[in-house]
Image: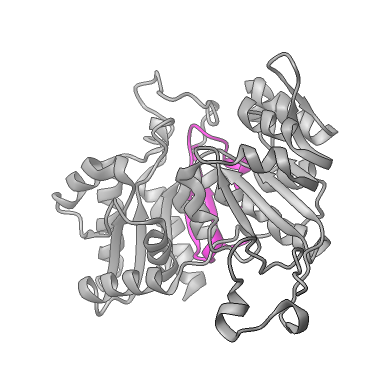
Amino acid sequence: MMIHTDCRHYRISLPCPPHKATGARCDDCRLYDPTGERILIVKLDAIGDVLRTTTCLEPLKAAFPSSHITWITRARAADVLRGNPRIDRVLTVESNYLEFILAEDFDLAIGPDTDHLSASIMRLARASSRRGFVADNRGGVIPLNDAAQQWWQMGLDDVLKRRNRRTYGEWLYAICELPLPVARPSLQPSEQGFAAASQLIRARAPDASQVICLNTGASSRWEEKRWKPEWYRQLALAIRAADPASAIILTGGPDEAAFNAALLASDGPFIDGGTDNPIDTFAGIIAASSLVVTPDSLGYHIACAVGTPAICLVGPTSPWELDAYGTNRVLHADLECISCYLPRCPLATTCMDALTPRMVLSAVSEAHAVTR
């Protein structure tokens, strides 16, 4: 009996899905789908950063249509990758990934991060070609092209970081040697995610004229990313005053449980969208919304992926590195210290304090007029 070990459906020691579904056998299977180039992507960072790096998949698949793509990440980010039709296998550093890396050959390995673990995995990978960064033998990293060299230097120099006006996607494509324009991130909420989001909206706002999602989620690493609670309250009241039939859904992550609970207890017209949703449900809520207002966080990158217009509120991180895809607005206060990357601000009035509800409401009104 012939066995096509190069087939995309091949499961090594288990019957493949076509065989289980139809009884097809390799000898005469019409679903035989041989894989071509084997590509490895190493991206271990925060969930939002992993998601926005999926912008590389579209041009990779255009260049290598029959490629088999393995992605190594951390377990917390695996959910934004699993089920992606452009990714064949997701491995996590918390599980048995190293055995695969040491045993298998790849045609191309991509590692766009300068952190030592990512670069070390890139060095260990048996790949004919590499793009991004690999570890040296003294605890450092080696950039593999001019774009990687510049990105690495920006990460070490605050002055260069603030001067930068290229987006993350543009840098990623240059580092990975991919052609522009930058594609949207790749994420498709499941039917269950859409159903959970739709049920929540129907139950709590059945007659809403529009659904606006206020996502308070922000990285625990950068505390100053989060907008101020009083500003969220004032913005919600102003939106409701302009459109009494609008539904304002408040969402966030586990780190925002107390923050959102305080807002829900205020006089703001909020609907509780939860802070413990699976990523799939969270993505469904954002996809079902007319507009998202969010800090620079996972919520913004999900909005980019599902195509929901977004207003991103930025202070300590770089507003210029965010891809907007022609549908989004990136707002920041006009202060010299923007993009400081400090986890805590030493000033009495921060850049996020200076980003007022009036400024954000103006952007919300403009976005609503465009999306109507």
Please name the residue shown 41% across and 54% down the image.
293
Foreground pick, 51 / 102:
102
Indicate the position of residue 368 as horizontal and vertical percent values. 44, 68
Q: Is residue 322 magenta?
A: yes
Tell which residue pokes out farthest to the top in this image. Answer: 138
**x, y percent for residue 62:** 79, 64
**Which residue is at 46% across, 76% downward?**
372
The answer to whether any part of residue 46 appears in the image is yes
The furthest residue to the front:
1
Q: Position of residue 209 (x, y in %)?
A: 32, 77
Q: Quadrant of the N terminus?
A: bottom right
248 lies left or right of 149: left
| Residue 146 relative to residue 286: left or right | right
**Where is 279 relative to 95, above or below?**
below
Q: Which residues are magenta?
A: 305-333
Q: Quadrant of residue 33?
A: bottom right
Q: Position of residue 153 (x, y in %)?
A: 72, 24
The residue sitting at 69% across, 57% down in the picture is 57
Residue situated in front as seen by the camera: 202 or 26: 26
Instruction: Choose between 138 and 308: the one closer to the eye.
Output: 138
Is residue 11 part of the magenta span, yes or no? no
**Camera sees residue 296:** no
Front residue of 9/252: it is 9
Q: Is residue 161 left or right of residue 76?
A: right
The quarter of the displayed image where residue 201 is located: bottom left
Q: Is residue 157 above or below residue 272?
A: above
